């Protein structure tokens, strides 16, 4: 390899690099196999020939932003090696100026997120009620999905107790459709005009800006106890749904009721549901708190690792469909009230397609940060309703992108470009990247050939449903049905299993225990009394306060919806992580066999050893993935013991895994570690066996139920 000479020999600092810097030109690294970039499209939506990715740079040499080659980027231009820096150094000023502006405002809510590319395949089942082309049988549509927490800022931790965003961009042939949902099917407020208020209350206190990414503070509980329409959503947050195990194991909900329109112009009201193939699973609270310190990127890493390893997560898209009656009610439930669900037992969720996430983004900023969702991005066959929350959303999302992404042309950013042809009459503005030909961006015109033409009735135009408006008076108010603030919270609580209810009690007790104001705790207990007197009594006992009585006796037993409970079934275990404790004394052949078998079953084996590198040598050597120093129980769904090293960190590992109801197994060599941790081999969810096959079978069976809940009941 011939060494490259400095371009200007003798220039200070252009000598031989102090480290082994590559000196031969080479091609830029291609994206990793698990990564994809938005397909490069022109401002009109056409694919750009020959460009597979929207690369930010090209060529072998470092250049300025204007393409001039640079011979040095490590030394500013100075008057002598010890002299002052010269203002004329354009490269210095360009480099620093660009760096100074690298950050854009983070999202006011949902600032922290992770995203992936994928594909949606329609089943055709929605065709009788929607003419949307992408819902047709076997039609495949590229998607980009961003998951998020709501409250925390961009650098906050993943496993906080919070609602999660679940926003999907479908790049359909008829334009882009965004389904901007959450993992909780009800919302805090009924009218979008209160959105700034709930967000101000839930964000950190304005004086000290604490706590970060938490609802466990006075202003949040002040708001939700004074605005009792928030009761159902708050209860969902305090349930296991507030701390998902993985983005891959969350349901998604459109929350608001939408409208579908078929080819005959008939309207049906619908609620959207995403159902994860892996089931709905959660962390336990102590585990979540440890994760936030050990691995704040837990959910982000989990999603990217799963996709990279080929465990592509899948969700079925389903709808609950309701007749579009004049009152827009179903079985007494107001479909325009976003604090209400319709239990699946009353209106089954009908699957209409499946989404598979197949690739990680190539560049976080370009894709995950710059993606701009909007519930008003609709396609023919899907329309909005008069839900006052949704109506305010239709204004807010467009408005926010203008300040977040610096102007009205954010739709031209690669990740936001529609895959359908774009021929609008929008012109100019900040960051305009299109070069528009023609002279007549108005209609009708006689100069640009009359273009663009309007869609005829048969050319898949977006047509608003001509809904008759009730005769009415201008006012600020809400219908009487919006006064029901508690029936749905009762329904949810009554539908949970004992263990899930115990978690709810702990969550309220924890969060209210973090409040300083006595009046807020007392008012919150009065709200709990309206949900369930037992729940109220247990939380009150935990807070050391008297339990108030409900204002209205809970007469009829609330409806129960078993579909709302997360426990009691079995699910696939793809991508689950098993930690295997081993050292040089272990039967390394058995450990290697277990690693192979776990890997083959679609799970991830991680050997935990006393040091990095390998255990054993030669053909029997077993690579170590984690050491006693770098591991913590929270990264594993189950633990296998192939040795009993006397190390206190392993006692913490085993006792945390036990307390967090995880499956624990071992060969006889691991038995001493169990004994030292004070765990009986006869306790629920413990498998000890000589034979690796039997051991793994026992573990797999336990893991299919997600946790060994018997340990806590
Ligand atoms: Fe919102 C972002 C979901 C009500 C105003 N929202 C945002 C995101 C999700 C949701 C998932 C993140 C999108 C992304 O990843 O970029 N929001 C919801 C759901 C709601 C809801 C399910 C209730 C049904 N939102 C809501 C209301 C308003 C907003 C009532 C305002 C009136 N939401 C916004 C926003 C955000 C946003 C300020 C912040 C960043 C963004 O839009 O792009 O405009």
Image (cartoon, rainbow, N blue to C red):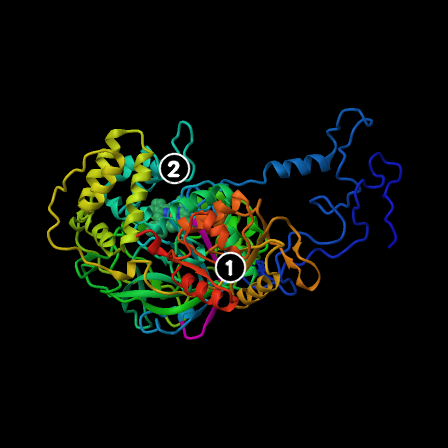
Foreground residue among 303 and 713? 713
Figure check: 664 above or below 216 = below
**Image disc number at residue 76:** none
Q: Does the residue labelled 1 lie within 8 Å of ligand 1?
A: no
Task: Report the magenta stretch's main SS.
Answer: strand
Foreground residue among 435 and 497? 497
- Looking at the image, residue 294 sits to the left or right of residue 326; the answer is right
- Looking at the image, residue 93 sits to the left or right of residue 264; the answer is right
Q: How crowded is mark 2: few (under 14 residues within 10 Å), some or many (20 or more)?
A: many
Is 182 contained in the magenta span? no
Figure check: 216 above or below 252 = above
State the extent of the magenta-drawn residues as a range. 136-148
Label 2 secondary element: loop
Residue 270 image offset from top left, x and y in percent = 29, 63
Image quadrant in which you'd find residue 257: bottom left
Distance, label 2 to label 1, CA atoms, is: 51 Å
Q: Residues within 10 Å of mark 1 (few under 14, many from 20)?
A: some
Q: Earlier in the sequence, mark 2 or mark 1?
A: 2
Quarter of the image where the N terminus is located: bottom right
Residue 395 visible here? no
Residue 78 image offset from top left, x and y in percent = 78, 29
- Looking at the image, residue 581 sits to the left or right of residue 170; the answer is right
Residue 400 image offset from top left, x and y in percent = 43, 44
Question: Residue drawn at (48%, 41%), measured in percent from left and top?
Answer: 156
Image quadrant in which you'd find residue 180: bottom left
Figure check: 524 above or below 626 = above
Q: Mark 2 points at which residue?
A: 203
Label 1 secondary element: helix
Figure check: 47 above or below 544 = below
Q: Mark 1 points at which residue?
A: 668
Total marks drawn? 2
């Amino acid at each position: 390899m011939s060494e490259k000479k400095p371009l200007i020999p003798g220039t200070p600092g252009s000598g031989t690099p102090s480290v082994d810097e590559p000196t031969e030109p080479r091609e830029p690294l291609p994206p990793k196999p698990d990564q994809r970039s938005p397909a490069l499209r022109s401002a009109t939506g056409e694919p750009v020939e020959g460009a597979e990715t929207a690369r930010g740079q090209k060529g072998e040499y470092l250049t300025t932003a204007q393409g001039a080659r640079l011979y040095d980027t490590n030394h500013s231009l100075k008057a002598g090696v010890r002299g002052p820096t010269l203002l004329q150094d354009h490269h210095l000023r360009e480099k620093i100026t660009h760096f100074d502006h690298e950050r854009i405002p983070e999202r006011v809510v949902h600032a922290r997120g992770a995203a992936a590319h994928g594909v949606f395949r329609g089943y055709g089942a929605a065709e009788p009620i929607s003419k949307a082309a992408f819902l047709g049988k076997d039609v495949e549509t590229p998607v980009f999905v961003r998951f998020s927490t709501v409250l925390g800022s961009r650098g906050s931790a993943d496993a906080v107790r919070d609602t999660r965003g679940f926003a999907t961009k479908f790049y359909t042939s008829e334009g882009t459709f965004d389904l901007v949902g959450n993992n909780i099917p009800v919302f805090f407020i009924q009218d979008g005009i209160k959105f700034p208020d709930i967000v101000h209350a839930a964000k950190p206190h304005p004086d000290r800006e604490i706590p970060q990414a938490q609802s466990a503070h006075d202003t949040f509980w002040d708001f939700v106890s004074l605005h009792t329409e928030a009761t159902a959503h708050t209860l969902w947050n305090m349930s296991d749904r507030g701390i998902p195990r993985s983005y891959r194991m969350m349901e998604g909900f459109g929350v608001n009721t939408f409208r579908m329109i078929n080819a005959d112009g008939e309207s049906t009201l619908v609620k959207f549901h995403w159902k994860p193939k892996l089931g709905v699973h959660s962390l336990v609270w102590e585990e979540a708190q440890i994760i936030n310190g050990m691995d704040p990127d837990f959910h982000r890493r989990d999603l990217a690792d799963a996709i990279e390893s080929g465990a592509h997560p899948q969700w079925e898209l389903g709808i609950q469909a309701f007749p579009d009656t004049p009152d827009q009610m179903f079985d007494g439930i107001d479909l325009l009230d976003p604090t209400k669900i319709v239990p699946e037992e009353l209106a089954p969720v009908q699957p209409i397609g499946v989404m598979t996430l197949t690739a990680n983004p190539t560049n976080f900023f370009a894709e995950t940060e710059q993606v701009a969702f909007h519930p008003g991005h609709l396609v023919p066959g899907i329309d909005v309703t008069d839900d006052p929350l949704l109506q305010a959303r239709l204004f807010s999302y467009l408005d926010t992108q203008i300040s977040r992404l610096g102007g009205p042309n954010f739709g031209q950013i690669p990740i936001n470009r529609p895959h359908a042809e774009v021929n609008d009459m929008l012109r100019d503005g900040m960051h305009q990247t299109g070069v528009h030909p023609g002279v007549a961006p108005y209609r009708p015109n006689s100069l640009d050939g009359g273009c663009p033409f309007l869609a005829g009735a048969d050319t898949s135009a977006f047509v608003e449903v001509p809904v008759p408006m009730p005769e009415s008076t201008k006012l600020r108010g809400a219908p009487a049905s919006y006064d029901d603030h508690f029936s749905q919270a009762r329904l949810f609580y009554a539908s949970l299993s004992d263990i899930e209810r115990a978690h709810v009690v702990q969550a309220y007790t924890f969060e209210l225990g973090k409040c300083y104001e006595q009046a807020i705790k007392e008012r919150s207990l009065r709200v709990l009394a309206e949900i369930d007197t037992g729940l109220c009594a247990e939380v009150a006992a935990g807070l050391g306060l008297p339990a108030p009585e409900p204002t209205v006796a809970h007469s009829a037993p609330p409806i129960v919806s078993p579909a709302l409970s997360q426990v009691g079934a079995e699910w696939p275990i793809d991508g689950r992580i098993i930690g295997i404790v081993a050292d040089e004394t272990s039967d390394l052949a058995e450990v290697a066999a277990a690693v192979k078998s776990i890997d083959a079953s679609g799970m991830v084996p991680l050997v935990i050893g006393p040091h990095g590198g390998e255990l054993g040598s030669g053909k029997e050597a077993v690579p170590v993935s984690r050491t006693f120093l770098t591991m913590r129980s929270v990264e594993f769904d189950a633990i296998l013991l192939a040795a009993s090293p006397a190390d206190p960190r392993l006692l913490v590992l085993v006792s945390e895994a036990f307390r967090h109801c995880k499956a624990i197994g071992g060969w006889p060599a691991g038995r001493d570690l169990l004994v030292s941790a004070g765990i009986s081999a006869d306790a629920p969810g413990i498998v000890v066996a000589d034979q690796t096959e039997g051991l793994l079978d026992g573990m797999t069976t336990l893991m299919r139920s997600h946790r060994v809940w018997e340990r806590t009941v």
